[in-house]
Image (cartoon, helix red, strand yellow):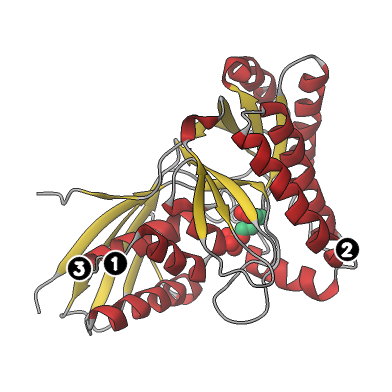
Amino acid sequence: MSTLSATACAHPNIALAKYWGKREGEGNVPAVPSLSVTLAGMTTTTTVTFDGALASDELSLNGASTDGRPLARASALLDVVRRDAGIDARARIVSANDFPTASGLASSASGFAALALAAVRAAGLDWSVTRVSDLARRSSASAGRSLFGGFVELDGGDGATGTSASVASPSALDLKVLVCVTTEAAKATSSTDGMLLTQRVSPYYPAWLQEAPRLCAKIRAAILAGDFSTVGEYAEKSALAMHACAMAAGIVYVSGATLAALAEVRAMRADGLQTYGTIDAGPHLKCLVRGSDAAAAKERLARVPGVLRILETSPGDGARILPLAE
Ligand code: PMV
């Protein structure tokens, strides 16, 4: 068989309304709805090549040949594509991020979004973006959101199918996200393991299941109303509620630098800048800020001890196929 190849790029997304926890049953469907913004300024680029000469799937991640769990997860996704396309060939996956991998910077979201789109197109399948998003979600739930640009909702909870859909375009809010990088190291507890433990032992998990949908609805309405400060206020509440729930299970993703950066975000707010903080399953603090306040906020955050560097990002587009290199 000849080779079949496609290259896709995707951006990470940051949840404004977090999901944490999975619904029981198949399909990797979140236990609560979530709402994210897709971020231009950080990119994963992935090429998938189905090649009849390969004995097994191969994965190169940021220039290093990788096996174990990352390769097994990628192969599971490829198997779904192979089944639908009637392809037997194994594939070579070459993927690179232009930002730190596996440290709570949502590299799994952009990674599986780019992988799903590249694999589907390399196999010659004409799937809708919703179907590609569904495939990506089965590997990493937040990845389903990165197929879409702007503000994106992923449904979750009883009766939900885990479908992602666009809520508003990238220009719906005058938003910058300042990603305060506090380590280049990989995180100690994966989000999957952290969620499983939270669901099993956190005494606050039932309260989170009640609260998260309310926070998500509030954020959705505020985005549609163009109400920046309500979006920020509830995004910060959502992140803190999620971390409180995880911490009660013994899982701590934040570091001293994360909390110092959050304190600075709150100090800036007291000084009249429109800044809000959010934190994912890692120690980086993401500051949500109005475009007009971004430069001042960046300058102050850069002086916080433990903040190594700051990535400035804005709402961006969904995953897309890149033209084949000559
Ligand atoms: O689906 P995962 O394994 O990438 O987990 C994502 C978890 C959070 O980033 C903390 C929340 C979210 O909704 O993205």
Ligand 1 is found in the corner quadrant, namely bottom right
Task: Tell me the residue that label 3 is attached to.
Answer: 124
Query: First in sequence: mark 2 or mark 1?
Result: 1
Label placed on residue 204 = 2
Identify the residue at horizontal 50%, vertical 71% (top origin): 138
Separation of marks 1 and 3 at Cα, in angstroms: 6 Å
Q: Quadrant of residue 222?
A: top right
Task: Tell me the residue that label 1 is attached to.
Answer: 120
Q: Is residue 256 left or right of residue 52?
A: right
Residue 90 at least partly seen:
yes
- Type of the residue with mark 3: Gly
Label 2 CB-ligand 1 distance < 8 A = no
Identify the residue at horizontal 64%, vertical 54% (top origin): 34
* Residues at circles 2 and 3 in contact by the CB criterion of under 8 Å: no
Q: Quadrant of residue 122?
A: bottom left
Identify the residue at horizontal 32%, vertical 75% (top origin): 81
Label placed on residue 299 = none
Separation of marks 2 and 1 at Cα, in angstroms: 40 Å
